[in-house]
Image: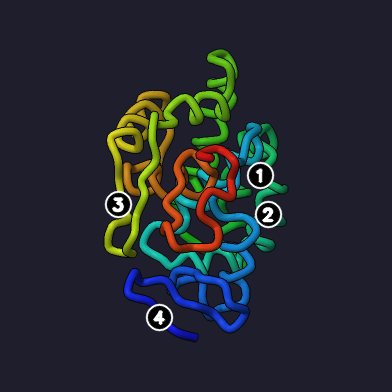
């Protein structure tokens, strides 16, 4: 593997990836097939918001490795099911070693499921989040050029908080926007740049 001047790594398969996706097979697979691809639909967007909230303060690799356990523990992130969770469910989740056992984040997942249900009256979570898609996307040439927030992520965070969501800070929402294709922060030299079809 060879690191280029832009910060991408030329991997052994001849493809250029950012350093975070260059060596770990799980992260490489995620980067190559999923990260930055459009995610629409209530359940999919709710799952991503939940996982990004759990990721706060941790590495994404930790969350990705635990994602199968998260999906099992949270009933595949079915919104109506999670919204109906009780204190018994909170305690069940706190005993589940397969997930991140953080009581505040677990409660936020339940809170956000209820807020997601309430958003159905405004057209639903997916359309609401996608309404914050900017007019243009960053074009980072170097890893240091990739921002961590944007005016749109700040606005999305504020709008979701106003509607009762928790663990949806501007940085977390920027990471969500990157992950689900609202923006394309793939480095210009990356083999994945433009692959979402949103920003062609």
Which of the two labelled residues, at mark 2 and mark 4, occupies the earlier sequence position? 4
Residue 3: quarter of image: bottom left
Q: In front: 197, or 52?
A: 197
18 relative to 130, above or below: below
Q: Which mark is residue 71?
A: 2
Q: Which mark is residue 3?
A: 4
Q: Secondary structure at mark 3?
A: loop
Q: In front: 131, or 146?
A: 146
Q: CA distance from mark 3 to mark 1?
A: 29 Å
**Do the residues bearing badges 2 and 1 touch, measured as CB atoms within 8 Å?**
yes
Q: CA distance from mark 2 to mark 1?
A: 6 Å
Foreground disc of the pair 2, 4: 4
Q: Secondary structure at mark 2?
A: helix
Image location of residue 50, percent across then percent down: 52, 47
Which of the two labelled residues, at mark 2 and mark 3, occupies the earlier sequence position? 2
Residue 4: quarter of image: bottom left
Foreground disc of the pair 3, 1: 3
Residue that carries the numbered disc 3 in the rendered image:
147
Q: In front: 100, or 4?
A: 4
Q: CA distance from mark 2 to mark 3?
A: 29 Å
Q: Secondary structure at mark 4?
A: strand
- Give me the residue at 48% from left, 64% from top: 60
Does residue 55 appear to the left or right of 195 in the view shown?
left
- Give me the residue at 53% from left, 21% from top: 119
Residue that carries the numbered disc 1 in the rendered image:
77
74 relative to 111, above or below: below
Q: Residues within 10 Å of mark 1 (few under 14, many from 20)?
A: many
Does residue 73 appear to the left or right of 2 in the view shown?
right
Image location of residue 73, percent across then percent down: 67, 55
């Amino acid at each position: 593997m060879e690191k280029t001047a832009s910060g991408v790594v030329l991997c052994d398969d001849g493809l250029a990836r950012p350093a975070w996706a260059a060596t770990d097979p799980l992260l490489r697979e995620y980067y190559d097939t999923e990260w930055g691809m459009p995610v629409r639909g209530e359940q999919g967007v709710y799952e991503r918001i939940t996982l990004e909230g759990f990721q706060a303060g941790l590495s994404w690799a930790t969350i990705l490795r635990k994602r199968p356990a998260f999906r099992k523990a949270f009933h595949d992130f079915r919104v109506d099911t999670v919204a109906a969770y009780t204190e018994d469910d909170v305690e069940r989740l706190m005993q589940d070693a397969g997930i991140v056992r953080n009581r505040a984040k677990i409660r936020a997942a339940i809170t956000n499921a209820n807020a997601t249900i309430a958003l159905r009256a405004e057209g639903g979570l997916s359309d609401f989040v996608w309404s914050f898609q900017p007019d243009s996307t960053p074009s980072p040439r170097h890893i240091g050029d990739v921002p961590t927030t944007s005016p749109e992520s700040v606005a999305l965070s504020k709008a979701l908080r106003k509607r009762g969501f928790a663990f949806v800070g501007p940085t977390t929402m920027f990471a969500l926007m990157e992950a689900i294709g609202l923006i394309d922060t793939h480095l210009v030299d990356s083999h994945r740049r433009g692959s979402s079809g949103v920003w062609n």
